[in-house]
Amino acid sequence: MDFFDLLAPIYDRVFHPDLGKLCQQRDFPTEGWIIDIGGGTGRIASTIENKEQKIIVVDASLPMLIEAKKREQLKPVLADGAALPFTAEMIDGVLIADAYHHFQQRDAVIKEVYRVVKGNGVLLIFEPNIARFVVKIVAVVEKVLGMNSRFFTLDEIEKKILPHGFSVIEKREDGTSIRICVKRD
């Protein structure tokens, strides 16, 4: 049992879904299949209000997905982001919110995203901004907790993603957060 398995029952009370507008930016798909990789309890995915989107929360923690199942608009799937159980070019948009730094096989996850997302499909990554002091404290705490997290700057994330066949639509630093939105070429 890992940290997220233990935290699942109280996760949404501790970490509030304050990112409601995240997937309402201009290039994120407004309809079709959306997956939230590392989506845990679905706290972010559940803020997507467009009924034309079918939202799948992919996570490797069963207790987190049990919590996600309580949100009727979400379809939880137990899987590793590095081995997604979807056919090629099936997905319209992918969200990775506050999870990229937890992935142990980041390149494999991005390759899988490229495989499953449709042509011109969008990947939106939202992460803590390691350039900020408060995020550096979070990084130390996660290290002490044995979470094996690795935080990246916006430029480092971009350099890891673009070689896999994506091009940047938008990238932005907002205080303690960074986000990069890319599309499949």
Image (spheres, rainbow, N blue to C red):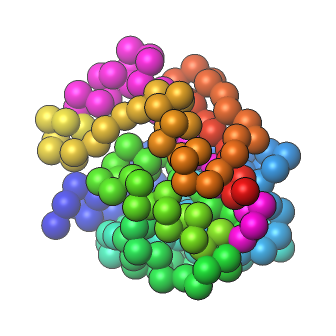
Q: Horizontal placement of 108 versus 142: left or right?
A: right
Q: Nearer the viewer, residue 167 or 109?
A: 167
Let me know if residue 133 is in the magenta part: yes
Residue 10 seen in the current view: no
Q: In the image, what residue occupies the spot 82% across and 70% down?
A: 31
Let me know if residue 135 is in the magenta part: yes
Q: Nearer the viewer, residue 92 or 10?
A: 92
Q: Nearer the viewer, residue 30 or 159?
A: 159
Residue 27 seen in the current view: yes
Residue farthest toward the top in the current orientation of the protein: 133
Look at the image and give the residue range highlighted in magenta. 118-141
> In x, y percent, where is residue 111?
49, 62
Q: Quadrant of the N terminus?
A: bottom left
Q: Quadrant of the C terminus?
A: bottom right
Q: Is residue 129 above or below residue 37?
A: above
Q: Horizontal placement of 182 versus 67: left or right?
A: right
Q: In the image, what residue occupies the spot 22% across and 46% down?
A: 147
> In x, y percent, where is residue 100?
43, 48
Q: In the image, what residue occupies the spot 29% across and 30% down?
A: 139
> In x, y percent, where is residue 119?
75, 67
